[in-house]
Amino acid sequence: MMERAYFVVCLALGRLLRSGRYSKAWIACQDGVLVLPCLAGKTLATLLEDPLLEESVRKRAIERAVVALGDFHHLGLTHGDAMAENVLVDLEAGVARWFDFETIHDSSRVLAWRRADDVRALLVTCLVRTSPEKFAETLQLILDVHEDEGVTRHLATSFNPVFQRSLTFHLAQAALSFQCFREIARLLRERRIHVANELSERATRPERAGAAASEGECRRGRGAKPLGKR
């Protein structure tokens, strides 16, 4: 099992290197072992636990982590254990780098579910380090940066207490209280409703514009005077 995991990890990292999104200096291979050099920055978890961290810096750190996770997802890859503890954020350079790749998603799961599980892991491990009054703002930030309605849909299902219970692995990532679990479910529900309303509004906007134009033409037609008459 470890050989297969190692093989998949190597393939994933190889695709990342070929994509040009990561420097080749980041990953070296020595005697068949992947070596990550010492990198600048701190883990996102460490940054979020700093009580003196400014709010603008907190948001920027989370945003960088989500952008880096999106790089994996755009390549058709997923992380498998995308916790705030597993991403280094270099605030000065404005970049984030994920590590700890040994956990692999079940390949029989659809890609949207695997992506959603990555976002779920990042979300909950950020929220357990976030004050309750900033829950909604943090959730919105993560989903706005990632911006994938399929992921949001799977996330909403994973936080539905009727259909889903936290797995042991999920609890090991972040032991959420039931109250916190329900609050995340509520926020996701509200977001999905908001997105659905926005899509409906966009769909009906051209129809309303067309109807308004037709009505304007009719009014102009009724108000026009026949030629030759004053």
Image: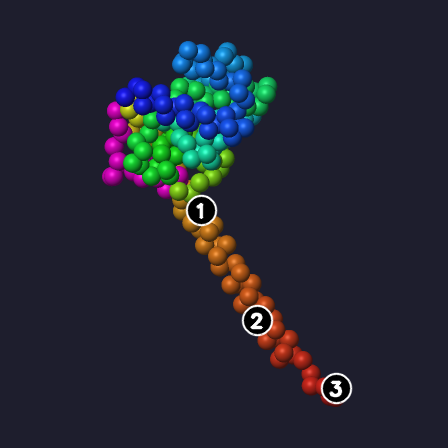
User: Quick one: SS at disc 1?
Assistant: helix
Give how far across and how far down residue 201 sits, in percent: 48, 54
Q: Residues within 10 Å of mark 2 (few under 14, many from 20)?
A: few
Magenta range:
151-168
Above or below for 64 versus 155: above
Taking the image as shown, residue 61 lies to the left or right of residue 105, namely: right
Q: Which residue is mark 2?
A: 214
Identify the mark at residue 73; answer none if there is no mark: none
Camera-side residue of 46 and 10: 10
Sequence-wise, which precedes: disc 2 or disc 1? 1
Q: Quadrant of residue 211?
A: bottom right
Above or below for 213 versus 147: below
Residue kind at label 3, given as amino acid type:
Arg
Sequence-wise, which precedes: disc 1 or disc 3? 1
- At 42% from the left and 43% from the top, the residue drawn is 149
Q: Which residue is mark 1?
A: 195
